[in-house]
Image (spheres, grey):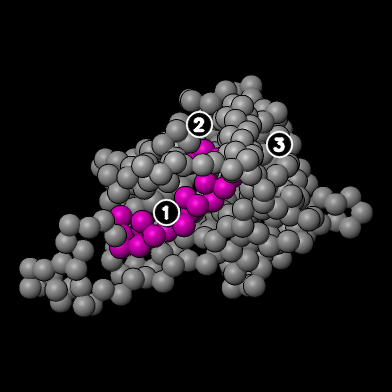
Amino acid sequence: MSEVRIRPRQVLVLIIVFLVILLMVHRNGKRTCQGPAYLQAMYAKQQDENLPTIYCITPTYARPHQKAELTRLSHIFMLVPNMHWVIVEDSETTTNLVRNLLERAGLTQRSTQLNVKTPTAFKLKHNDPNWIKPRGVEQRNLALSWIRTNTDADKHNIVFFMDDDNSYSVELFAEMTKIEPGRVGVWPVGLVGGLMVEKPLLNPTTNEVEGFNAAWRPERPFPIDMAGFAISTELLFKYPEATFSYEVQRGYQESEILRHLTTRSQLQPLANNCRDVLVWHTRTEKTKLTNEEALNKQGKKSDEGMEV
């Protein structure tokens, strides 16, 4: 049998590798970040326990592209350390599809899976345009109730309504951590309301929000998209009546909750004084499944035994 000889250089390499592994172990499991400066700052604050938790509320319902939408959002949670995902399904029970997605993304400990069915009278029919009836009212209110029941009223955290058909920059969530206790943060939203961007308009002297550039129903108290604001949890505990309602006009859901919490001048401008667009109201095109429907008529399925 030939003798195996280890050279001094190989020994040195092995020692270096061992020391690197040892250093990683002695970081007590704390994650580090080599990404953009704003993410590095968030990870540093998290290790110092100075980072508020962002509770992201996502109403969702069963449809062909549901898993694709939620998978895209899950990647944001993988990157940002201080986010907790409250997913509320419009269904009689929670589903394995959502549960499996959370497990696969490693988010089981950083998520809450809830469910509540939308009343039939307020449910969109197959060919209804998505704006004809308010959506997500039951789901968002259930999530708000869960937050008021399960989080610390004395701790400063953030609530954001994170619809699953929008596109979000990770930087948006770094901006949310700047929201001060007792305030609502606001920023521009791209591709919404028939405009390239809807945005708060600031007073050049005081930097307070004095209006909005919305073209659709600009007379609304808060002509702003659901993706354009986040709320300090202190306000939700202070004003328990702040919820969403079916008894409001089309496009007034945002105003319905904000009217209980703040005034225009008290809003906190973020995203470079509302000059940066960090979220877009993109919406996914409705999936065309004509060939799948033809298969179904033959008693067949292209996704037999699969979860798509």
Amino acid identity at mark 2: Ile
Circle 2 — which element?
helix
Q: Is residue 112 above or below residue 127?
A: above
Describe residue 60's horizontal placement relative to residue 125 as left or right. Answer: right
Describe residue 155's horizontal placement relative to residue 109 as left or right. Answer: right
Amino acid identity at mark 1: Leu
Describe residue 180's horizontal placement relative to residue 95 as left or right. Answer: right
Q: How many neighbours does mark 1 have within 10 angstroms: few (below 14), some (14-19), or many (20 or more)?
A: some
Q: Is residue 58 above or below residue 238?
A: below
Instruction: Name the foreground residue: 246 vs 195.
Output: 195
Identify which residue is drawn at 36% across, 42% down: 1
User: Can you tell which quarter of the image residue 195 is in?
Assistant: bottom right
Identify which residue is drawn at 89% across, 58% down: 204
Q: Which residues are magenta?
A: 62-87
Quarter of the image that includes the C terminus: bottom left
Please give the residue where the numbered disc 1 appears in the rendered image. Answer: 70
Identify which residue is drawn at 28% across, 51% down: 120
- Dot placed on the residue nearer the N-terminal end, 2 or 1: 1
- Dot placed on the residue nearer the N-terminal end, 2 or 3: 3
Verify CB contact (< 8 Å) between mark 3 and mark 1: no
Residue placed farthest to the right in the image? 205
C-alpha span from label 2 to label 3: 26 Å
Describe residue 88's horizontal placement relative to residue 307 as left or right. Answer: right
- Dot placed on the residue nearer the N-terminal end, 3 or 1: 3
Please give the residue where the numbered disc 2 appears in the rendered image. Answer: 147
Circle 1 — which element?
helix
